[in-house]
Image: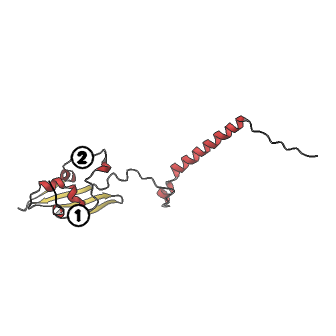
Amino acid sequence: MAQKIEATDSSPQQLERLSIDVRRSAFFLLMAFIFLGPAPGQLFGWHSSWLREWVMFSDVGVGIPDGTFTVAHADGTTETHSPLEAVGLESYPLIRHYLFEGRVFEASDLAKFATELCTQAELASSVSFKGKVGTRNGWQPMQAEDICAETELQP
């Protein structure tokens, strides 16, 4: 006796159900990859270019000094200023913080940051900075003496 094998055509309902299941599975796999992909690097230190870590607000404090600017006058008196006073702002720009041109990346950038303080200081005065600056690796200590003399400033 020969057994006859018939090719059964899938009904449209079965094909539709299969299509829905494939799309649903693909969605959940993609969702799991997006949600759990950064976890090995964050939790276990396994770094990969395929599984990148979560990096939120990574540049917000970069280049912003935290410390004091000290103006030493020729007569021996000193006055201290916060970084905001040195820049002449009431607060750092919230909108477009990443484009804030006064950001400090190295000690030579302090003169550009404190341009307003340098232009207000007398010629015989010396402006110095002692504090820390935000970097991608956390706060780094920074100290600079006579920052206004390092670069020529145009008022």
Foreground residue among 9 and 39: 9
Q: Residue furthest left?
A: 75
Residue at 21% of width from left, 64% of height from top?
144
Q: Residue furthest front?
A: 154
Looking at the picture, which amino acid does disc 2 mark? Ser
Q: Which numbered marker is on residue 91?
A: 2
The quarter of the displayed image where residue 64 is located = bottom left
Numbered-mark total: 2
> Type of residue at label 1?
Gln
Q: Position of residue 52 (x, y in %)?
A: 48, 55
The residue located at (52%, 53%) in the rendering is 37
Cα–Cα span, label 1 and label 2: 23 Å
State whether residue 24 is above or below residue 113. Answer: above
Query: On residue 134, which mark appears?
Result: none
The image quadrant of residue 15 is top right
Q: Which residue is mark 1?
A: 143
Disc 1 or 2, which lies upstream in sequence? 2
Give percent across and percent down for residue 16.
67, 37
SS for callout 2: loop
Residue 128 appears left or right of 133: left
Percent position of residue 120, x then y: 12, 54
The spot of residue 82 in percent (x, y) is: 20, 53
Tell me what residue is drawn at x 20 percent, y 60 percent.
129
Which secondary structure lies at badge 1?
strand
